Amino acid sequence: MKKAVKGLKDIGEFGFIDRISPGCLTRPEGVVRAIGDDAAAFRSTPGRLNLVTTDLLVERVHFLRGGASGRDLGYKALAVNLSDIAAMGGDAREAFVSLAVPADCSVDYLDDLYLGMKDLAASFQVNILGGDTTGSEQDLVINIAVWGEVDEERMLRRDGASPGDLICSTGSLGDSRAGLHLLLEGISPDSPAMETLLQAHNLPRPHLEEGSFLGASGGVSSAIDVSDGLSSDLGHLMDQSGTGALLRSSSIPVSPELREFCREFKFDPADFALAGGEDYTLLFTVPGQAAPDLQEAYRKEFRKPFHILGEMTSGSELVLENDDGTRDSLSRTGWNHFSGPSSI
Amino acid sequence: MKKAVKGLKDIGEFGFIDRISPGCLTRPEGVVRAIGDDAAAFRSTPGRLNLVTTDLLVERVHFLRGGASGRDLGYKALAVNLSDIAAMGGDAREAFVSLAVPADCSVDYLDDLYLGMKDLAASFQVNILGGDTTGSEQDLVINIAVWGEVDEERMLRRDGASPGDLICSTGSLGDSRAGLHLLLEGISPDSPAMETLLQAHNLPRPHLEEGSFLGASGGVSSAIDVSDGLSSDLGHLMDQSGTGALLRSSSIPVSPELREFCREFKFDPADFALAGGEDYTLLFTVPGQAAPDLQEAYRKEFRKPFHILGEMTSGSELVLENDDGTRDSLSRTGWNHFSGPSSI
């Protein structure tokens, strides 16, 4: 009997990374972060790091062309890359846009796509500096690479957390997944709350100022942006830092809009916050004794506090403490890149 | 009557670039080359430039999965990017690989793809430092971005040629197109010459050492890598420098292998050399008085001379001088990214 071809689905994204990584570094000097962080970091000038991140979006896997305006699609394609630079504490500087365009995609749609990118680029003083434009037989494909930089001592990384460090977020979680639900179910938003959730999904704000502030603070032990979902992305911090984590259910930040949505559609907000993904807030850890000063400075800078969700623990388990004090062990399921379209 | 949707085919790659360029630069300081050169060049350290180039390859447009081994495909996908850095006179340092993988693509094929990239990367001390891996509904998509660097004063650019400058090439032209012919016609190579042509198409060597040497020489007025074909790529130097050009038919470098191929299949080698494309040699210009010294130094370094094909002229025409002294005006047709697959 012939064995079926083994594909990416069988080994997963991280299995694939493990498989292809050996031999990728031919000149390790100067490389600070390679495959496996939010962005690669490498030195060319002493004390200063180059950051590069790249993200590939494919029609019918990541978005449906009819389901998103060109403008929203362009905005978000760039936003997810800027968010990766934010998660390194860096300044995003230059963007490179590659497009593979099928014949049935109008130039007007591409103009809109670029308008969305340019709007976001302008608001963070990012240049769109190059790229590649080519044809495609069927699907529209968008690859954006972003170059940024950061002082070496200010870089945020995934692997520095210790047991006892507080787990924090720069924003509430789950809104984007609720917005996606509205899109996928074809529900027209009929209230300001629903509009807010849709916007959280379509036009997420990359937390570049927050990342830069946290990197400059020197007090942050690890950081990541929430793209796959709280439990999944916290899992990356845990794996790379060698810790477990305890989340307190009552402390997970949920917006009033998500609460309203969950009341209306009979969902549990915790599910959206834990496994939703595409929030593009920053999830970070800070040693307990440094937290009060950081919170005070953060509040001064951003006129609102960051949220404290729980703490890193020894071991390797991810545990949720419920409101009644009982505890559940959580799996780290976030959004899986290999399973079906996510709209945008 | 409803007008048909206007697509990329109607405005062409360069029409598209003109259309989307306004508004792309939000922070022009430090930007030395933006959209429209072989790579973008921007400053972060005084006197030193970052170079970034990116290239998107889509199945059925740029390659046929069955028509190329994963290893050759991986090699070439990286080679074309390294060639862009070579055309800037830079050193290629870090590569970022994004893949969109359909379910029917085996992990073994991806392993081979990476092997091809790693082989080439190792031979030029380039790291594969990151990227993105995701799913695709149908076509395999490969985007590679390469970061390199160059001393500002050594950077090669497209726009510095003057009338009278000699037009030069670091290698012979047309071999790759002949190799593609063999592939597309399903002709098995039955001689060392045919093998050489196939190899020129499948495994082009990026001329990084040559580019670095030419940049360091200080004597080169413009440069580009030959990806679309001699007439088309020379056209870019002419357009950006504001010159015309005269090519001497007898001086266009054609390999013995291409001559043998053309004898056997009744082709004119000049057609392959002028319009073939994917040679990835460097095409450059040098003022006449600087040429002898440069040639001597080049010959010492590489143990062979560069080829002198003709000279830049005033005006804007591209003229071919035939062996009998008659002259033809040439159109600048190279390989068009928007017309059908090219295998790889």
Image (cartoon, coloured by chain):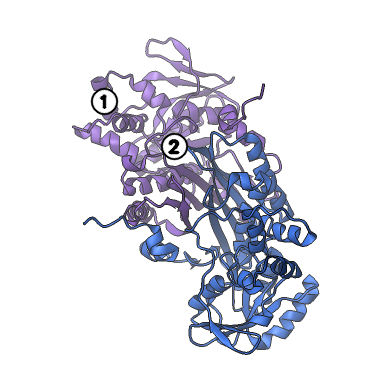
Chain colours: A purple, B blue
Neighbor class of circle 1 (other Cα within 10 Å; few <14, some 14-19, many 20+) is many
Left or right: residue B255 compared with residue A98: right
Q: Nearer the viewer, residue B58 or B301?
A: B58
Residue A80 visible to the viewer: yes
Q: Nearer the viewer, residue B271 or A197?
A: B271
Relative to A343, say whether B236 is above or below.
Answer: below
Q: Tell me the SS state at disc 2.
A: loop
> In x, y percent, where is residue A261?
26, 25
Query: What residue did someone put label 2 on?
Result: A61
Residue B25 visible to the viewer: no
Relative to A59, say whether B298 is above or below.
Answer: below
> In x, y percent, where is residue A1?
67, 21
Image-quadrant location for residue A310:
top left
Residue under the image location 43 percent in, 45 percent down: A139
Q: Earlier in the sequence, mark 1 or mark 2?
A: 2
Residue under the image location 72 percent in, 76 percent down: B306
Label 2: chain letter: A
Q: Nearer the viewer, mark 1 or mark 2?
A: 2
Label 1: chain letter: A
Query: What residue did someone put label 1 on?
Result: A261
Residue under the image location 23 percent in, 21 percent down: A264
Question: What amino acid type is highlighted by mark number 1?
Answer: Phe
Q: Nearer the viewer, residue A146 or B236?
A: B236
| Residues flagged by tags 1 and 2 on a common chain | yes
Image-quadrant location for residue B265:
bottom right
Question: What amino acid type is highlighted by mark number 2?
Answer: Val
Relative to B159, say whether B258 is above or below.
Answer: above
